[in-house]
């Protein structure tokens, strides 16, 4: 009798809360920049359905929570009726093949320029410290960033509410849940990281204060759509977009422990990268 082949853990079923996943391979959120005028396009139906398997989890590309959230060309949003309606057939196509579909909701913060902002205004952030130009992935083009405007304390609740409404819109569009983008140097990460956050109010200074914005968003989204429909992505060890922290381990542990009380579906953590010596 021949020996049974070894079980491949990635291909075994997993119960993720109320979702019965047939395997553990997940489509991570991948920015596509093909949603012209911030509206998802019909060709996304084919793109996502091709990547769907029965019982598989997919996370849709980062989708802006408001007209101030954009930082790249032609990224989708979830703040207008047109956007919500455009997402519906895409979500339906994934569900028709038995997939579980979450949408990543996002605000770029200072990783933007005035060309992406309403009325050509400055991007918003926790700080007014500018981001230096960044070489793009093609190794040729350079992204230029407009110096950001520091959010007033009384403006922050509106941004929290934008995430709440985007989560509601995602559920209306048919998504099974949302992933809050709290990683990679975007707005939520800017608040959490002490290399960026230089505030002196209740959203800056101590670790607890720097994480306050992120946790207020989690609480608002959980209260709106339910904890079983909420995930978050974090990258405490990353320094992407000049957003590093002096004690990333403490940051990651504090967020993980704080998230426990909300009972969210998952925490999607970006692995640390090895630090290397750059050659001159």
Image: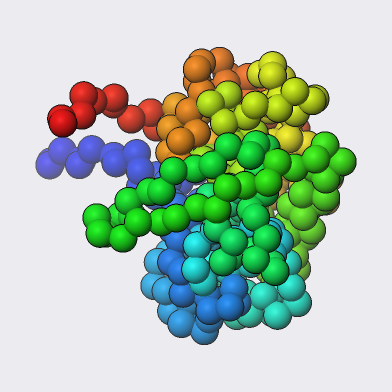
Tell me if I can see residue 92 in this picture. no
Q: Residue at x 77, y 49 (%)?
A: 159
* Quarter of the rendering occupied by the C terminus: top left
Q: Residue at x 71, y 27 (%)?
A: 199
- Which residue in the rendered view is the most extreme toward the right? 154
Q: Position of residue 19 (x, y in %)?
A: 60, 51
Report the colour scheme: rainbow
Q: Position of residue 3 (x, y in %)?
A: 15, 38
Tell me if I can see residue 76 in this picture. yes
Q: Residue at x 63, y 53 (%)?
A: 123
Horizontally, residue 17 falls left or right of residue 45, namely right
Question: On screen, 215 above or below 115?
Answer: above
Nearer-the-camera pick, 5 or 52: 52
Corner quadrant of residue 53: bottom left
* Quarter of the rendering occupied by the N terminus: top left
- Which residue in the rendered view is the most extreme toward the left? 2
Question: On screen, 225 above or below 89?
Answer: above
Question: On screen, 94 above or below 244?
Answer: below
Q: Position of residue 16 (x, y in %)?
A: 58, 43
Q: Residue at x 56, y 66 (%)?
A: 115
Nearer-the-camera pick, 269 or 154: 154
Q: Position of residue 92 (x, y in %)?
A: 60, 76
Label count reads 0
């Amino acid at each position: 009798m021949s020996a049974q082949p070894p079980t491949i853990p990635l291909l075994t079923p997993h119960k993720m809360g109320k979702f019965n996943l047939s395997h553990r391979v997940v489509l991570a959120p991948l920015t596509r920049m093909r949603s012209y005028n911030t509206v998802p396009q019909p060709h996304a139906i084919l793109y996502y359905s091709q990547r769907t398997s029965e019982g598989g989890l997919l996370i849709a590309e980062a989708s802006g929570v408001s007209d101030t959230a954009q930082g790249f060309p032609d990224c989708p949003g979830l703040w207008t009726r047109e956007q919500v309606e455009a997402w519906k057939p895409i979500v339906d196509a994934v569900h028709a093949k038995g997939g579980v579909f979450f949408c990543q909701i996002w605000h770029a913060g200072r990783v933007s320029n005035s060309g992406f902002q309403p009325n050509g205004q400055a991007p918003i952030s926790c700080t007014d410290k500018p981001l230096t130009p960044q070489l793009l992935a093609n190794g040729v083009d350079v992204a230029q960033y407009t110096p950001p405007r520091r959010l007033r304390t009384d403006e922050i609740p509106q941004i929290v509410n934008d995430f709440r409404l985007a989560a509601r819109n995602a559920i209306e569009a048919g998504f099974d849940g949302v992933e809050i983008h709290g990683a990679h140097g975007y707005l939520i990460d800017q608040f959490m990281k002490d290399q960026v956050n230089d505030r002196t109010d209740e959203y800056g200074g101590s670790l607890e204060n720097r994480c306050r914005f992120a946790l207020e968003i989690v609480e608002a989204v959980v209260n709106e759509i339910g904890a079983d429909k909420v995930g978050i992505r974090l990258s405490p060890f990353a320094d992407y977009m000049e957003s590093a922290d002096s004690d990333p381990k403490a940051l990651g542990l504090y967020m993980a422990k704080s998230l426990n009380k909300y009972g969210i579906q998952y925490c999607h953590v970006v692995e640390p990268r090895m630090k290397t010596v750059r050659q001159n």
